[in-house]
Amino acid sequence: MTPSNMRSVLLGTLLSALWIMLSGHWDVRLLLLGVLSVGVTVWMARRMDIDDAEGLPMQQLPRLIAYLPWLARAVVASNIDVARRVLTPSLPIEPTTVRVHADQTTVVGRVVYANSITLTPGTITLEVEDDAIEVHALTGEGAHDLCTNEMGRRVTACESR
């Protein structure tokens, strides 16, 4: 099977799983509509030539899957921190903007890093450049955590070598 065909099968599988997770129904008509929608989407992606290695980096998937539990823990911890600050007015909120270094060598790596920052409550990516990401943080502690570059190192480890 060619790499292009493998990417199409993977794209179809991921879209099918997403369809089932979002619909939550096992009605035959809905499943047939899902199959039709996925088929048309995969066909359009192939026709537009956007199912390439950059758009669907299969070689990075195992490392990205290993990164997801760490990201989930970071999201939960940040969520708890933000909720505590909202529910306890005495805790400080110090909005700040910082620039964090982006070591990622690929566009996909920088996008994953920027999206990981935005997914983490209390931080949002404002601008992505070649070697830096501008971030708004709700607290100085959140900004400091980003400046330690733990998330950046983990995303860089996900990139292909």
Image (tube, rainbow, N blue to C red):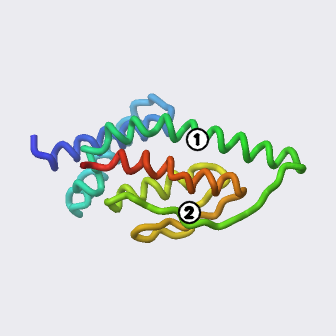
Q: What residue sits 55% from the left and 67% below the top? A: 99
Residue 151 x %, y %: 49, 48
Horizontal side of 42 relative to 109 (left or right) equals left
Q: Residue furthest left?
A: 1
Please give the residue where the numbered disc 1 appears in the rendered image.
Answer: 74
Q: What secondary structure is found at the residue carrying circle 2?
A: strand
Is 65 situated above or below 91? above
Residue 152 rendering spot, x and y as whole percentages: 46, 52
Q: Position of residue 48 (x, y in %)?
A: 23, 63
Q: Nearer the viewer, residue 111 or 159?
A: 159
Q: Residue at x 64, y 64 (%)?
A: 136
29 to the left or right of 44? right
The 10 Å Cα crowd at callout 1, few under 14, some 14 to 19, many 20 or more, is: some
In the image, residue 88 sits, relative to residue 29, either above or below, namely: below
| Residue 97 marker | none
Q: Residue at x 39, y 31 (%)?
A: 28
Q: Amino acid at mark 1?
A: Ala
Q: Position of residue 86 (x, y in %)?
A: 81, 49
Quadrant of the image containing the N terminus: top left
Using the image as rendered, state which of residue 46 and residue 63 is in the foreground: 63
N-terminal label among 1 and 2: 1
Q: Which residue is mark 2?
A: 125
User: In the displayed structure, would residue 5 be above or below residue 131?
Assistant: above
Q: Nearer the viewer, residue 20 or 75?
A: 75
Q: Which residue occupies 27% across, 50% down?
A: 42
